[in-house]
Image (spheres, grey):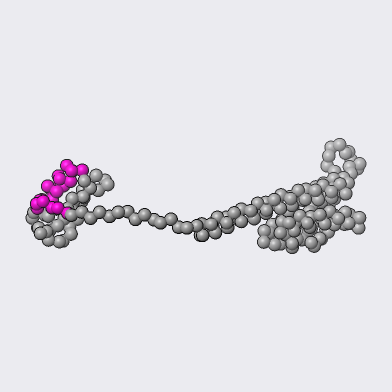
């Protein structure tokens, strides 16, 4: 874990750095459990004057703001960001590190859940590949003989189609002697297919 300390109009003391580094050691274990080995930490310390109306004039104390950014460089990637303000620098550091730890624990839980889901999907895929395949039943095909009683006109074929309620009717055209098929369309109208075959 690489740690960079940045001070904006304020100097980092050895005591403050040791305080942060001591807490960050706890994070190393949590991050390894989340499979995050390559981690870069940037801790930025800045100051401002308190803006609270409780403090009047020059008596307003200095407020320390700590920004903590943890850059995760491995497969999951991402950034953990936390910030806190306090009139006591060590209190601000403590609060920001606690908030970062809370976020790391959430990250670890999320990564564990992702791994569990990944293992479950993998097991289901392997199970579906190794499971015996069910035999697909082929529908029975019944061959029937086509009986065309007598040649008829197109008009008679359409009339016969309407009366019988069937969806198609093969017939021999009385005028041409060709085999044709009258059929009912979805729209309710009728069509004729000319097979160009001579009827017997």
On the image, the x and y values in percent for residue 52 come to 83, 39
In-image side of 2 versus 174 (left or right): right
**Res 125 quadrant in image:** bottom right
In-image side of 71 versus 183 (left or right): right
| Residue toward you, 70 or 26 | 26
Q: Quadrant of the C terminus?
A: bottom left
Which residue is outermost to the top?
A: 54
Q: Residue at x 73, y 56 (%)?
A: 33
Q: Would you say residue 157 sits in the magenta stretch?
A: yes
Q: Would you say residue 194 sits in the magenta stretch?
A: no
Bounds of the magenta span?
A: 146-165
In-image side of 107 versus 56 (left or right): left
Q: Residue at x 12, y 61 (%)?
A: 198
| Residue toward you, 95 or 164 | 164
Q: Quadrant of the N terminus?
A: bottom right
Q: Residue at x 76, y 48 (%)?
A: 102
On the image, the x and y values in percent for residue 83 come to 78, 49
On the image, the x and y values in percent for residue 168 come to 21, 50
């Amino acid at each position: 874990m690489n740690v960079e300390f940045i001070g904006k109009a304020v100097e980092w003391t050895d005591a403050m750095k040791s305080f942060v580094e001591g807490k960050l050691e706890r994070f190393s274990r949590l991050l390894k459990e989340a499979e995050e080995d390559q981690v870069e930490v940037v801790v930025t310390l800045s100051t401002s004057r308190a803006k609270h109306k409780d403090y009047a004039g020059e008596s307003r104390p200095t407020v320390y703001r700590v920004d903590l950014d943890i850059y995760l460089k491995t497969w999951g990637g991402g950034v953990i960001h936390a910030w806190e303000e306090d009139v006591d620098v060590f209190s601000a550091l403590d609060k920001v590190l606690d908030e970062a730890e809370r976020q790391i624990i959430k990250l670890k839980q999320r990564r564990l859940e992702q791994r569990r889901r990944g293992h479950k999907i993998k097991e289901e895929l392997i199970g579906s590949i190794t499971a015996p395949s069910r035999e697909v039943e082929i529908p029975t095909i019944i061959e029937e003989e086509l009986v065309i009683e007598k040649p008829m006109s197109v008009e008679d074929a359409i009339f016969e189609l309407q009366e019988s309620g069937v969806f198609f009717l093969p017939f021999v055209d009385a005028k041409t002697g060709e085999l044709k098929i009258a059929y009912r369309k979805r729209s309710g109208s009728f069509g004729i297919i000319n097979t160009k075959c001579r009827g017997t």
